Image (cartoon, rainbow, N blue to C red):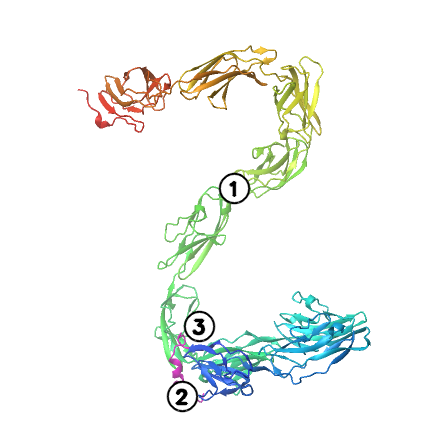
């Protein structure tokens, strides 16, 4: 407050750049330095390192560095130099340059500090001693060979040479090299262990390797060491601190005779997780990706036949800090308060400190409070502007988070938030007029109506945020309102008009409507409203918006007037029943009204169809009623389905009519031993509803069969056979399992029956063979049925003949002649119809061309003595034989006769056909067809004519090249001309169309080839003069 006189001067820099500017930006690190371990090599002259540091911001950040908290000042003569934000250190000196480095980046917004990065130097000196005294032990005794690594910095690894390089000691259950001390442990010395041992030490950073002096191992000659219990020589520390996510290795090894076994376990009894490979453990327990649950006390157990020994150690979990809540950039008005909270996880629990512009923030003023991760600043001033950092740390590290604080001071400004120019409210409604000027600090808000200051009263109030609320608005409340904002830096105002409108009222009362499926209905929605406002009607069905044009076209807007939002529902379905809401909206209010629509329709499907009891021909059913859809059920209908039926079929029930209140019925006249499904349909005054779901399949009981096979017949077969055939009984008529047939037969006139069982429901044939059966002997036959429940009836007795023999004689008097180029007529003398049980059912006529192997065969039926073979080729010789046949096969062939077919008919059609009409006559002329050398001569022509395309043609023959047809000319005609000769009919001319022209004489000359067809065009018609 004591600086108020200079406040305007102090604020001026803050007002220049707009807060929203995308050009200016506080510094943010994009690259921070990391720790460096530098390997010391005395041979390298220009030793240097580079710490990286990079930040973005606007203005571009500048950089400076600290070493162990003290500022570094790069100079031209100094071995420090800056390149951008990177720090280069040349001519390294491990005593002067080792330590902790931090990068500071800054611009006009403030300063931020990077994480700490250390520079350490790795080196390793040579062993001081050059000789070591020998170690003397008994065979069977344990021994420890010390390595004693030289002075060094950096991690080491150890190995041992046995006698000479490159023979290295291999570790096993008897020998162990500690990577902590470098010592070699031999649990039980054997004679083969005698020799020189050399410790090899490698620095993992510098990659330098040095060898110690050899240590001779010799055996004492005063006896062999006896057995003794394990003695643990390699122990892990009492407490080992392990970082989260790291891999920890703990060592344990014992001397003893016999060689001890090494095993590990957790003292809390929890088994090792799968990430720990206990098979590889032995002297080293390795736990990768260490987590909190891996912490605890571990025990190493060394054991042999003489005893056991143990050692315990605790693995303690630790985690460097990890930020889980960070402060964010903020801008605050002057005199406001700031609270920033910073939270981090870690073990041990992190502590917190705050920095401002790269320096630790101290609570020197009462208004600045720092408590753990909480920073609070009250009564903000411009001096508080800057970059702040929360630093969370424990002994395992620190993490930094950055945030910028901007403090703003602005005079009232409405340029970005003018009052709405027009605000509307319905009469009797509430309205809120928002006033949101931009100003800092927040000042006072007042309102005017017209030119008068607005006074608060019951209905009118100015809220704490400056907004104006008017409740239960009246017409006089309409007018021009002005919001006036003030603070110590200025005054500003903004105005807007309030308009009070008449409320919207729905005049249609709520209702419940009743309609039947398939009908249409109008749902009314009539309103009164302020005429200056536009109405918007919206309809909802069961609270879901109706999209007109969707829903299958059932919904349609029919409100023709401005104040009507009626809709029609066409062809109403059951699913359209429910609650319909008409919502009416204007710019000042919205109201709605609901109507319930009840849809009556056929009943829904019954449920829970059960077969309560089933016999061989009946089934008792029960069900539960489905929804009646607002019309009582009057009757139920039952349908059944089997694997053999075509879909669902109505069935006979008791009672015959199942009333709407009855929920049981008995189905009768079912087929035994058939799987049935049943379903139920309900009907009411409106119609029949959808069927129920089918019942579970149920099979009727078995009973003896009642149906015998149909179409029993037979005959044929081989010699001495009686062949009996029938149509199998369908499965649905077999009445039970184990279904089969009983075949009974006897010679005609005999008294006793022979019977045979055919135990297959699908069988359709039985063959009885006996050498005593004479050919074509009559037998009486009947076929019966049986199943597991017993025998059924036999079918009627029929007569069947046994197998007959092939005809024993060949036909005689074979004649063959060529009828045309494509037909041969064959004739023969018939054999007696029945000769010694050898019937003749007809004849086989076979023909083949010269040099053809396969013959074509055609059969005649009965006592026919001639046949015409069609489809043969002209000018070819054919060989023909005839044989008689019956059911046993074909008999002996006749003698072979040959016949040569006639030459083929002419292949050329009649050409240059000319026609004219005169006095009800059609006169046709054409050019004579000349046969080719290999074709039969033309002996005449056939003229085919018909009145329409689909009638049979009439034929006139002539041996000349012209013809007169006396035909009435009041009809259209279609004419073709064919040549013929002894080889048959030749190629036909194309069809000629003669039009219907009564009382006219016409002529037309047409050249007909195989490629064209003409009807005489109208422009060639001429009157006969």
Judged left or right of residue 616, residue 225 is right
- Residue 260 in magenta? no
| The C terminus, quarter of image | top left
Q: Earlier in the sequence, mark 2 or mark 1?
A: 2
Residue 678 visible in the shown view: yes
Which residues lie in the magenta part?
1-24
> Dot 2 surroundings within 10 Å: few (below 14), some, or many (20 or more)?
few
Judged left or right of residue 629, residue 793 is right
Judged left or right of residue 138, residue 840 is left
Q: CA distance from mark 2 to mark 3?
A: 37 Å
Residue wearing tag 1: 601
Residue wearing tag 2: 6
| The N terminus, quarter of image | bottom left
- Residue 22 in magenta? yes
For marks 2 and 1, give the one nearer the viewer. 2
Of helix, strand and loop, which one carries label 1? loop
Q: Earlier in the sequence, mark 1 or mark 3?
A: 3
Instruction: Note whether 383 is above or below 242 in the view shown.
Output: below
Residue 235 visible in the shown view: no
Q: Earlier in the sequence, mark 2 or mark 3?
A: 2
Q: CA distance from mark 2 to mark 1?
A: 87 Å
Is the Cβ of the residue at disc 1 closer than 8 Å to that at disc 3? Answer: no
Judged left or right of residue 857, residue 502 is left
Residue wearing tag 3: 461
| 434 vs 998, nearest the viewer | 998
């Amino acid at each position: 407050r004591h600086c108020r006189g200079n406040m305007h001067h102090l604020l001026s820099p803050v007002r220049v750049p707009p807060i929203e500017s995308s050009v200016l930006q506080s510094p943010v690190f994009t690259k921070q330095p990391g720790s460096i371990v530098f390997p010391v090599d005395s041979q390298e002259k220009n030793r240097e390192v580079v710490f990286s540091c990079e930040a973005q911001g606007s203005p571009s950040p500048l950089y400076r560095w600290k070493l162990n908290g003290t500022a570094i000042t790069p100079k031209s003569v100094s071995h420090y130099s800056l390149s951008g934000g990177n720090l280069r250190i040349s001519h390294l000196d491990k005593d002067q340059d080792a330590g902790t480095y931090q990068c500071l980046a800054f611009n006009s917004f403030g300063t931020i500090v990077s994480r700490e990065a250390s520079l350490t130097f790795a080196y390793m000196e040579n062993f001081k001693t050059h000789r070591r005294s020998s170690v003397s032990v008994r065979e069977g005794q344990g021994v420890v060979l010390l390595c004693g690594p030289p002075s060094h910095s950096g991690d080491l690894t150890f190995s041992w040479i046995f006698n000479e390089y490159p023979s290295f000691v291999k570790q096993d259950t008897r020998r162990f090299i500690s990577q902590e001390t470098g010592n070699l442990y031999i649990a039980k010395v054997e004679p083969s262990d005698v020799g020189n041992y050399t410790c090899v030490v490698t620095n993992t950073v510098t990659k330098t390797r040095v060898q110690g002096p050899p240590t001779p191992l010799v055996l004492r000659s005063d006896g062999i060491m006896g057995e003794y219990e394990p003695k643990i020589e390699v122990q892990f520390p009492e407490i080992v601190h392990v970082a989260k996510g790291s891999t920890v290795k703990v060592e344990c090894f014992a001397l003893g005779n016999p060689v001890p076994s090494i095993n590990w376990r957790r003292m809390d009894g929890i088994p090792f997780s799968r990430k720990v490979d206990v098979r590889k453990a032995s002297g080293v327990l390795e736990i990768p990706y260490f987590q909190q649950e891996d912490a605890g006390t571990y025990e190493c157990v060394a054991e042999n036949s003489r005893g056991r020994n143990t050692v315990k150690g605790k693995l303690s979990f630790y985690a460097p800090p990890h930020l889980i809540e960070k402060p964010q950039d903020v801008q605050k008005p002057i005199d406001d308060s700031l609270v920033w909270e910073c939270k981090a996880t870690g073990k041990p629990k992190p502590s917190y400190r705050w920095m401002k512009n790269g320096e630790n923030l101290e609570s020197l003023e009462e208004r600045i409070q720092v408590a753990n991760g909480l920073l609070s600043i009250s009564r903000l001033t411009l001096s508080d502007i800057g970059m702040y950092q929360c630093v969370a740390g424990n002994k395992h590290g620190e993490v930094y988070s950055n945030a910028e604080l901007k403090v703003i001071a602005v005079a009232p400004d409405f340029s970005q938030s003018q009052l709405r120019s027009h605000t509307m409210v319905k009469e009797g409604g509430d309205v809120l007029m928002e006033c949101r000027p931009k100003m800092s600090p927040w000042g006072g808000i007042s309102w005017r109506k017209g030119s008068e200051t607005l006074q608060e009263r019951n209905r009118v109030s100015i809220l704490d945020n400056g907004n104006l609320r008017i409740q239960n608005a009246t017409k006089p409340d309409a007018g021009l309102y002005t919001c006036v904002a003030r603070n110590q830096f200025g005054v500003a105002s903004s105005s807007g008009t309030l308009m009070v409108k008449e409320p919207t009222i729905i005049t249609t009362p709520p209702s419940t409507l009743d309609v039947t499926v398939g009908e249409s209905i109008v749902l009314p929605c009539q309103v009164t409203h302020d005429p200056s406002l536009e109405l918007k009607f919206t309809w909802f069905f069961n609270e879901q918006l109706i999209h007109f044009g969707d829903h299958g076209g059932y919904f349609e807007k029919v409100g023709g007037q401005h104040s009507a939002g009626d809709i029609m529902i066409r062809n109403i379905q059951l699913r359209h029943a429910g609650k319909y809401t008409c919502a009416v909206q204007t710019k000042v209010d919205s109201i709605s009204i609901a109507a319930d629509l009840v849809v009556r329709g056929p009943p829904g499907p019954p449920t829970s169809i059960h077969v309560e009891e089933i016999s061989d021909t009946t089934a008792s059913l029960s069900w539960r009623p489905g929804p009646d859809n607002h019309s009582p059920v009057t009757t139920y209908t039952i349908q059944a389905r089997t694997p053999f039926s075509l879909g669902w079929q109505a069935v006979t029930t008791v009672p015959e009519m199942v009333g709407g209140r009855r929920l049981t019925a008995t189905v009768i006249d079912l087929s035994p031993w058939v799987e049935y499904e049943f379903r139920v349909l309900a009907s009411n005054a409106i119609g029949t509803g959808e069927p129920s779901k089918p019942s579970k399949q149920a099979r009727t009981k078995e009973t003896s069969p009642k149906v015998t096979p149909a179409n029993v017949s037979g005959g044929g077969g081989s010699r001495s056979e009686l062949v009996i055939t029938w149509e199998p009984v369908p499965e649905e008529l077999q009445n039970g399992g184990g279904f089969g047939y009983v075949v009974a037969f006897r010679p005609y006139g005999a008294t006793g029956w022979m019977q045979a069982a055919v135990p297959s429901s699908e069988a359709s044939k039985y063959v009885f063979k006996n050498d005593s059966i004479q050919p074509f002997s009559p037998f009486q036959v009947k076929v019966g049925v049986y199943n597991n429940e017993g025998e059924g009836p036999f079918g009627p007795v029929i007569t069947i003949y046994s197998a007959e023999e092939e005809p024993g004689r060949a036909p005689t008097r074979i004649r063959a002649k060529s009828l045309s180029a494509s037909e041969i007529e064959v004739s023969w003398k018939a054999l007696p119809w029945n000769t010694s049980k050898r019937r003749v059912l007809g004849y086989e006529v076979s023909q083949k061309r010269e040099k053809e192997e396969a013959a074509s065969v055609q059969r005649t039926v009965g006592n026919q003595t001639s046949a015409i073979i069609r489809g043969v080729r002209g000018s070819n010789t054919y060989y023909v034989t005839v044989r008689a046949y019956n059911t046993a096969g074909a008999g002996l062939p006749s003698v072979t006769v040959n016949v040569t077919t006639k030459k083929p008919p002419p292949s050329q059609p009649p050409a240059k056909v000319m026609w004219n009409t005169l006095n009800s006559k059609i006169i046709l002329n054409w050019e004579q067809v000349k046969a080719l050398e290999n074709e039969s001569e033309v002996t005449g022509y056939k003229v085919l004519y018909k009145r329409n395309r689909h009638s049979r043609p009439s034929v006139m023959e002539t041996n000349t090249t012209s013809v007169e047809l006396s035909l009435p000319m009041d009809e259209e005609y279609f004419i073709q001309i064919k040549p013929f000769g002894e080889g048959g009919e030749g190629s036909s001319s194309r069809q000629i169309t003669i039009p219907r022209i009564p009382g006219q004489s016409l002529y037309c000359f047409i050249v007909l080839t195989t490629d064209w067809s003409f009807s005489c065009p109208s422009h060639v018609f001429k009157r006969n003069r």
